Image (cartoon, grey):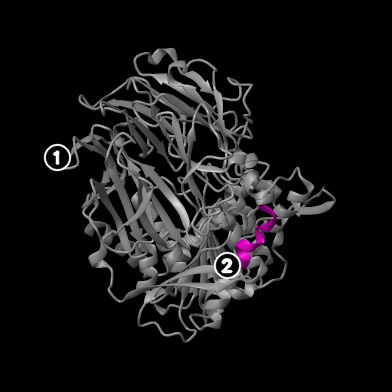
Amino acid sequence: MNWKSLVIILYITLSGCQGKINELPSKIITEECHGITIKDPYRYAEDTNSSIVKNWIADQNKVSKNLLNKIEKRQYLIDKQISYDKKKTFIISKLKVTENNKHFYLKRLPEENIPKLYYRNSFSSPEKLLYDAKQFKTKTQHTYIINYIQPNWDGTKIVISLTYNGKEISELIILDVSSKKTHPEVLTNAWPSSSGGIKWLPNNSEFIYSYYPIIDPKSKKFLKNTKAVLHNINKPSSGFIEILSKEHNPDLDIEEEDFPIISIENSKSKYLIGKIAGGGGLNYHNSYYLDINDITTKKWMPLFKKSNQIKDFIIKEDSIIYKTSKKAPNFKICITSIKNSNFENPKVLIQEYKNKVITDFDITNEALYFVTNTNGVKAKLYKYTDNITEEIKLDTSYGSITLNVKSSNHSELWVSAQGWTTNNKRYEYKNGILKNKHLNNSLENEIPNDIVVEEIEIDGHDGEKIPLSLIYNKSIKRNGQNMVMMDSYGSFGISMQPSFSLRRLLWVMEGGIYAIAHVRGGGEKGDTWHKGGYKATKPNTWKDFISCTEFLIKNKYTSSKKTAIWSGSAGGILIGRAITDRPDLFTVAIVEFGSLNILRSIIHANGDNIAKEFGSVKDSIEFKYLLEMDAYQHIKDKEEYPATLLTAGLNDPRVPVWNTIKFGARLQKANTSNKPNFLLIDSESGHAKDDPKLKEFERYANILSFALWQTGHRDYQPK
């Protein structure tokens, strides 16, 4: 019996249908927009409280889980992740180091499902347990998770952000470090893990955070009119004081969808910097400054504009050192005065490199340090002082390097480096000496030594060179029979940076090739690369992806029957349009919480910000861009589509879950390939940002086992 027959039999057995899962009834709505007729058969499914939709989701979950559970080796993938987790002894994350060297971090032991908060008085001091999320709201049934921490400058107090069920929107508590007692107030409507964070004032008793008036993701007012507010821990009953917002500062250029974010450089800062940030676009924004002594006034002064194309900046005394792409698409680092600025003709500290991108920089009291990256996969660290630039050699080559400092008044530089098969390494560079300052133990001894990484560039559809990373066992033969899993993203200028991933390793250990396509829309080749997959040029994103797939097939790494693809969030545009444009090229596609109906997402919730990256339906030209990148609108009836597994969380605050519901329903009705189109909709999850360990392990096992089944791995066929 072949696998297609098996699928049909299982469909009949599990769902009682005539060869298909129960279909969601279609109710076509037709509307005209800028002279174009749009048909939407599942518009009503955007109401996820509808009993029809709820019942359909329950049916989808039941059928999908039942069949996935019939893949006996799926449990092996869960057990393997647990095994690797135990070998790490512990996992440390969200490290924060104060100016007086106190270390605060989250730590999870192998037997634990969620991490706890610990601290040390110094790097080498004994650690102490500070807070367990189980202490929060003990009378509720929710499993709270710490998703952000921020100590004050002297480490005497710390703000802890807690959330549950993947909502991300959180509640804040303040903890006294010496007594381990929490303050009585609980601050709500916060989201420090996503935008703004927590900024303590130099007095160590007040902090600024972003307050979201509406926190219901289903409301059209969600993420609108955000306020940067001040909280005084010595006067908790007085409530917050608005510092920067559209309502509070009507004279500033703030739209209701903008996120006013405050930056304070260190405990001796003279200024507050107010960034008027927005999701998407080219990641540039207007910015203002305010004397820190005038914090309760409205005396904000202009600092720089979007047109200055400033990506990152550091305030040092009365100067601003910044990274800009203006007349330098691979970025350059400049300096100018705050009060007497000259952004049109600043002093250039580090000139643009033609063949590599400046990805990060930071400053100590000794020097300026910066990182370059070639094709997003080859990173180097440099030191700049007295007009001289020199490379700092690490112990091995890394694909990704990021920098952190206590402040520009201190000498310590912390370097975090990693690669596709290398765990995150942390070093301290001080007085010309590089020291190992790892906190996590490594799994490198567990990584098979016969795994190789191949970095190549392939020709895109228009002749552009597309970087492609391949990870596989060196015994692999290029005979067209290898399973390939390829992922990518290609939006917001975000690069697919090399990092160690157990899910990639598991795929390779099961005999497959793992591929990462560095498509346009990302930032691997600088600002130009981002603009190459942005609004009108967005089709380059999935066309680059298709070109990478065609290269792998032509050069016999794999075949279309062995090719699986995977992405999520804005990467849903990439995967959705790849399979609707070239359904013949892939055998299986996985999309997690994907933007699959961008034409509708753009007018909901955070749509005005997303429009800065993809386009606005209000503009007749940009509307056509959106229509072109809308995968839901490109599904054709009676087409042979790949097998698909679509996952999403009902609590997702970033991408409305109905993107997945509508696309899945439409695909099931249109597909004639007899390949399964499964959905898994989780009522206790969101955008997979704050999931407990075991939920994450199960998610990856579902995805990998489904892909291994569909690409023909004999050990992953349902029994």
Q: Is residue 537 magenta?
A: yes
Nearer to me, 265 or 460: 265
Whether residue 614 is visible:
yes
Compared with residue 62, is residue 412 higher up or lower down, i.e. above or below? above
Residue at (59, 28) in percent of width and height: 225
Q: Is residue 399 magenta?
A: no
Taking the image as shown, residue 714 lies to the left or right of residue 458, namely: left
Q: Quadrant of residue 386?
A: top left
Q: Secondary structure at mark 2?
A: helix
Crowding around mark 2 (Cα neighbors within 10 Å: few <14, some 14 to 19, many 20+) is: many
Q: Which mark is residue 315?
A: none
Percent from the top left, x then y, of residue 650? 52, 45
Q: Secondary structure at mark 1?
A: loop
Nearer to me, 395 or 191: 395
Compared with residue 414, is residue 474 higher up or lower down, i.e. above or below? below
- Return the residue at label 1: 126
Residue at (59, 67) in percent of width and height: 544
Q: Which mark is residue 545?
A: 2
Amino acid identity at mark 1 = Pro
Amino acid identity at mark 2 = Phe
Taking the image as shown, residue 591 lies to the left or right of residue 72, namely: right
Residue at (64, 59) in percent of width and height: 23
Report the span colored magenta.
Answer: 535-544
Percent from the top left, x then y, of residue 278? 57, 38
Q: Main secondary structure of the magenta part?
A: helix
Q: Earlier in the sequence, mark 2 or mark 1?
A: 1
Taking the image as shown, residue 693 lies to the left or right of residue 304, namely: left
Compared with residue 26, is residue 228 higher up or lower down, i.e. above or below? above
Q: Are marks 2 and 1 in contact (CB under 8 Å)?
A: no
- Quadrant occupied by the C terminus: bottom left
Percent from the top left, x then y, of residue 119? 22, 37
